[in-house]
Image (tube, coloured by chain):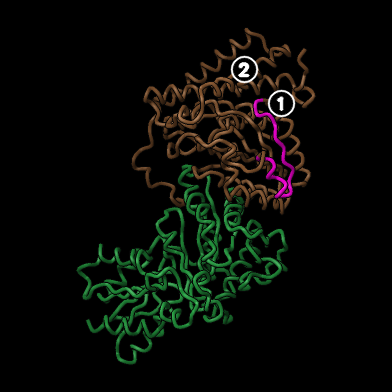
Chain colours: A green, B brown
Amino acid sequence: MAVISYIDAVIMAMREEMERDSRVFVLGEDVGIKGGVFKATSGLYEQFGEQRVIDTPLAESAIAGVGIGAAMYGMRPIAEMQFADFIMPAINQIISEAAKIRYRSNNDWHCPIVIRAPYGGGVHGALYHSQSVEAIFANQPGLKIVMPSTPYDVKGLLKAAIRDDDPVLFFEHKRAYRLIKEEVPDDDYVLPIGKADVKREGEDVTVITYGLCVHFALQAAERLASDGVSVHILDLRTVYPLDQEAIMEAASKTGKVLLITEDNKEGSIISEVSAIIAENCLFDLDAPIMRLAGPDVPAMPYSPSLEKSFMVNPEKVEKALRDLVAY
Amino acid sequence: MVENRHLQAGLSDEQVLEMYRIMLLARRVDERMWLLNRSGKIPFVVSCQGQEAAQVGAAFALNRENDYVLPYYRDLGVVLAFGMTARDLMLSSFAKAEDPNSGGRQMPGHFGQKKNRIVTGSSPVTTQVPHAVGIALAAKMEGKDIVSFVTFGEGSSNQGDFHEGANFAGVHKLPVILMCENNQYAISVPIEKQLACGKVSDRAIGYGMPGVTVDGNDPIEVYRVVKEAAERGRRGEGPSLIETVSYRLTPHSSDDDDSQYRSPDEVSEAKKIDPIITFGAYLKAMGIMDDQMEKKLNEEIMEVVNEATDYAENAPFANEDTLSKYVYAER
């Protein structure tokens, strides 16, 4: 078992699935000879050739739409959007088509496509290379949205997404790509889509979050531990549909809940998590639900001071947790 | 003396008669849907009338055992030629559970039937063009001899998905036939307000494929050009764009009043060259069909349409408890 980075886990999952199943192929901009702008498809072109690692014209609706057609035919396409911010031209294909193909055909057709995209800020990416776009897709039954936080989860969940019989949006935090490393088994394993995961057991206060913010929460939890405060951390992993049972269990366990996303606050994934807790756990709560999120401005600015102010970080999480514990 | 054109195009007498039968069936099913709509029995109709020749001519040029079709909402003729039945179409019109297109979930005209390789479609126009390209790509990857055939209207040829899909197919030399059924109106907006170029087929050059415009009222001519495009695709030479020019004989849909934007005279003129009439006349001139055969064919078709209507009207709606089924795969 080797220590690998988050992005290496992305590559490993795709390579293993392409070796296992000849129907799996990759398409997107710069995914071929260049191996992707982040190198997330590095080595695949050399191993599988240009028939299965396809450099497409620069047109996102076609990347999604051609993938959807191939998926309906019976292939297992993995379409890459170069940045989550650039998924917008493909939204009609994703929401009007991929999400509804099974339902609208009464189960006659289905669409097993994976659409991967790097998202998230803190990399000086400015407005159009920093966005979190999951909330746009998170009220579209028929879609699944996976946003892993660790290399182990990346590998197991991306393999599960590729084998899934329905469309899966797989959002990878671009700052996690080379920052987050851990031991990942070389063997074949999958993790269940739709299941959250407890990343730290605790008794006093609960954090529910996903993506890079899981790591901010883990760091903050370490700092609080030295003061005798025990933090429970639930990583959603799949942000749509949500693992309601795990959310209720985590919220009820401590009665104090901090929800975190780096997306804009209003109408975000954690808004829905908050509603689930409010509907089901009101009498288990010892404090109002607290949310820590990006501000409601259109997107993350380029300027370092403004970017820092927008982003969630361990210090902001620590402060929020201390306030919540003191309530 | 009328020239025999179908033999030249490689079509037998039996084939052209069968083409006419399907064109007529499409027309009669469509007319029945309007009657049912106007008598309050079905909520909606969107018509094929005036485009049957283009649809059936094209379908006959394809391999109807192997090829994939991605029809748009007017393509009754295409889906009937690819194995859908009048009963299937009536079940869809009445939104009944047994409707093979969608189990009554979608409006009529939203075709889909996997067993006949009729790919499920939606209402946002032209999204099916990239799907057709993806199917051709997948078939090519698997080394299968499959052509994908996709249709859309002239208004839809302005959508990004038309251009993105056409370009992708051109770059990868995929066996896709893009057929624009130009009926001269996008609801109320005439072609001169849709296109800055003279013809939809002019757009082909930008995507490295041949583009041709043909008379959409002439099923033999449509057959000929689609056949050529299919052969081109099968030889690995890439996609083709075909524009069939016809006229939409009905309002856009049962909810449209076309007298607001076009004159009755214009519609009357178009009805003089209605392909059901002109192709019927051709078959008679060729001695393939006589008045008696025509009468018998009409009677047989009316029987089929009546049976389909009765069956569909009496069929059950989907049970309410199926509302949440098939959002995701069920195990």
Q: Provide the residue designation for mark 1.
A: B220
- Of tags 1 and 2, which is closer to the observer? 2
What residue is at 78 percent from the left and 17 percent from the top?
B3
Q: Which residues are magenta?
A: B200-217
Q: Amino acid at mark 2?
A: Ile
| Location of residue A216 (image quadrant) | bottom left
Q: Secondary structure at mark 1?
A: helix
Q: Is residue B331 visible?
A: no
Quadrant (top left, top right, bottom left, bottom right) of the C terminus of chain A: bottom left
Q: Is B205 on the left-hand or right-hand side of B73?
A: right
Q: Provide the residue designation for mark 2.
A: B277
What residue is at 65 percent from the left and 66 percent from the top?
A31
Q: Is residue B59 visible?
A: yes
Parent chain of label 1? B
Outermost residue to the left: A283
What residue is at 56 percent from the left and 38 percent from the top?
B72
